[in-house]
Amino acid sequence: MFRSFIPFILASLGFTMISWATKMPLFEWQFSKIVTDFSSACDGSLPSHWTTRFGESLDVRNRPSLSKDLNIIVSRSSTDESFDRITRGLYNSRPLLFIGVMLSIGYMWWLLLRDKQDMASHVGVALLFSILAVFICLLFSQVVRLAGPAVGQTPYYSGIRHCRGAITFNATLSKIHYETLLVLLVSIAAEVGSLGLMLRQIIRTGIQRKDVQVQ
């Protein structure tokens, strides 16, 4: 009976770890060759370096907090842009991990109720496990919110967001926080492990039913 709960534990771990990663630093950037062309007086300036979290990007297109009269142009190497694009794609794929959690709950119900004997007790156990699953998800989310590491959420352009004109600068990737990549790897491995366990059990059940029908 407990084995029906294992995929949910793994899926929840993966979802929690990637939520944790969104509060961790990933890339450190060095800014140089800053050229400004403001149409009016502007007292703000860009920092000389900046740290972005997992899911953040130096690309400022479609940012509602940025004035439409300000044009920020960031020059980076193709390799640095590729790193940024790949991690951004992983960040945008986070809902898939939540879908994995929902699938694991559905799998738990299927495994507990596939034997129609003593249906009432199995429904009770499934409900109990579902309540426990929701409690674990809420607990994990609070742990991440209160105890997780955090990097400031102020954007690097906060000092010039109300300026008018254009600013151009070079951004060079100076450091990668591999501990954040490790957390992401663990979350993906946990999710893949959860899906693998569910798929393995479903295939095994199908083979057993075929053997029974043959006999």
Image (cartoon, rainbow, N blue to C red):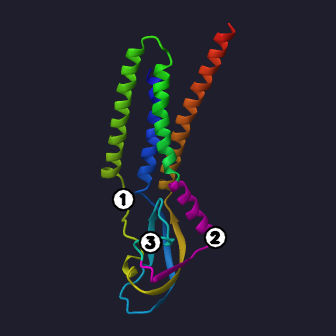
Instruction: Please report the residue visible at 53 percent of the width from the left and 48 percent of the height from the top.
Output: 185
Nearer-N-terminus badge (2/1) = 2
Q: CA distance from mark 2 to mark 1?
A: 28 Å
Helix, strand or loop under label 2: helix
Give the residue number, with chain letter if any, for mark 2.
Answer: 78
Q: Amino acid at mark 3?
A: Trp
Magenta region: 67-92
Instruction: Please report the residue visible at 39 percent of the width from the left and 79 percent of the height from the top.
Output: 161
Q: Position of residue 14 (x, y in %)?
A: 47, 43
Nearer-N-terminus badge (2/3) = 3
Q: CA distance from mark 1 to mark 3?
A: 14 Å
Q: Amino acid at mark 2?
A: Ser
The answer to whether residue 12 is magenta is no
Left or right of 174 in this view: 139: left
| Residue furthest top in the image | 215
Helix, strand or loop under label 1: loop
- Residue 205 occupies which quadrant of the picture? top right
Q: Amino acid at mark 1?
A: Ala
Give the residue number, with chain letter if any, for mark 3.
Answer: 50
* Quadrant in which the N terminus appears: top left
- Residue 132 occupies which quadrant of the picture? top left
88 or 66: which is nearer to us?
66
Give the residue number, with chain letter if any, for mark 1.
Answer: 150
Tag 2: Cα neighbours inside 10 Å, few (<14), some, or many (≥20)?
Answer: few
Using the image, determine if residue 101 lies above or below residue 149.
above
Q: CA distance from mark 2 to mark 3?
A: 19 Å
| Residue furthest bottom in the image | 40
Q: Position of residue 187 (x, y in %)?
A: 49, 45
Using the image, determine if residue 131 lies above or below residue 183.
above
Tag 1: Cα neighbours inside 10 Å, few (<14), some, or many (≥20)?
Answer: some
Q: Position of residue 73 (x, y in %)?
A: 53, 79
35 or 214: which is nearer to us?
214
